[in-house]
């Protein structure tokens, strides 16, 4: 009931992820990114703790494939999990346990992994990767293009209700962290609308954190 894309931007070294699901607040459980280290997705019958464990393994020096193999070998109930991983060199790894729900698939690309379960078709994941790699523009735009392509290729067996877009770049906190926790119509379209609102302000909020003396006005009443 989830499909996602986790990737490393080869131009900036940023890590990002997009995800959507029929369940509420999917980004709160499945997205795991760490500046300079990597990005991980933990989905299907989700154990959110596995994302942090994969990133810890990367930070200790293991490449993505070794980190994934080590976690899979030593984790109880791993057959219920679907995992994606990208490391700081663009290495990738993916795992779908035997308990992964319905039609499922993972595709590893250049510094990116697309994954999904309970899909209408395995082609959904291929569409995600193809759109991400062929789209120009900001990292977030490319990630969102992948997510929308997955929806347009048939998406899940049921409707999507939540979606998220997260990017970690030059700061330890996410420079983009946008979520639609429940929407009855099209959470991916709603997420894209929120990105259009956030994009022109993204740098301003980073500046407010690192150089408050030069930060632009908030533009609200009383803010001189």
Image (cartoon, rainbow, N blue to C red):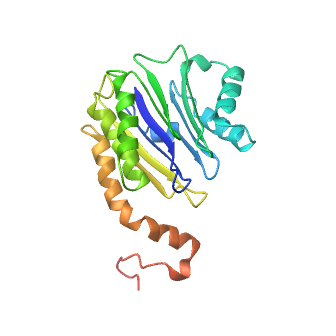
Placement of 105 over or under 138, stated as above or below: above
Please identify the quadrant where the N terminus is shown. Answer: top left
x and y percentages locating residue 44 in the rendered image = 49, 25
x and y percentages locating residue 82 in the rendered image = 53, 25
Q: Is residue 31 left or right of residue 152?
A: right
Placement of 212 over or under 109, stated as above or below: below
Residue that sits furthest to the right in the current view: 60
Q: Quadrant of residue 23?
A: top left
Residue 182 in view, yes or no: no
x and y percentages locating residue 145 in the rendered image = 34, 44
Total tally of numbered discs in the picture: 0
Q: Quadrant of residue 149?
A: top left
Q: Residue at x 60, y 36 (%)?
A: 51
Residue 55 in view, yes or no: yes
Q: Residue at x 56, y 53 (%)?
A: 13
Please identify the quadrant where the C terminus is shown. Answer: bottom left
Placement of 29 over or under 136, stated as above or below: above
Residue that sits furthest to the left in the current view: 185
x and y percentages locating residue 99 in the rendered image = 52, 14
Q: Residue at x 57, y 57 (%)?
A: 173
- Of residues 114 and 213, the one nearer the viewer is 114
Placement of 20 over or under 79, stated as above or below: below
Residue that sits furthest to the bottom in the current view: 224
């Amino acid at each position: 009931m989830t499909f996602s894309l986790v990737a490393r931007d080869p131009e900036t070294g940023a890590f990002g992820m997009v995800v959507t699901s029929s369940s509420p607040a999917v980004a709160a459980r499945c997205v795991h990114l760490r500046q300079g280290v990597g990005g991980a997705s933990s989905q299907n019958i989700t154990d959110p703790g596995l994302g942090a464990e994969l990133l810890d393994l990367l930070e200790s020096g293991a490449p993505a494939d070794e980190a994934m193999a080590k976690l899979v070998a030593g984790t109880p109930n791993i057959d219920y999990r679907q995992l994606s991983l990208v490391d700081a060199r663009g290495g990738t790894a993916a795992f779908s346990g035997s308990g992964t729900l319905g039609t499922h698939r993972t595709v590893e690309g250049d510094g990116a992994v697309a994954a999904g379960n309970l899909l209408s078709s395995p082609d959904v994941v291929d569409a995600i990767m193809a759109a991400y790699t062929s789209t120009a523009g900001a990292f977030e735009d490319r990630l969102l293009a992948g997510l929308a392509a997955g929806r347009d290729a048939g998406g899940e067996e049921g409707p999507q209700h939540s979606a998220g877009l997260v990017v970690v770049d030059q700061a330890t906190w996410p420079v983009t962290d946008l979520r639609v926790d429940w929407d009855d119509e099209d959470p991916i379209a709603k997420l894209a609308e929120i990105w259009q609102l956030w994009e022109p302000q993204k740098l301003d909020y980073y500046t407010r954190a690192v150089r408050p003396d030069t930060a632009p006005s908030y533009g609200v009443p009383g803010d001189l």
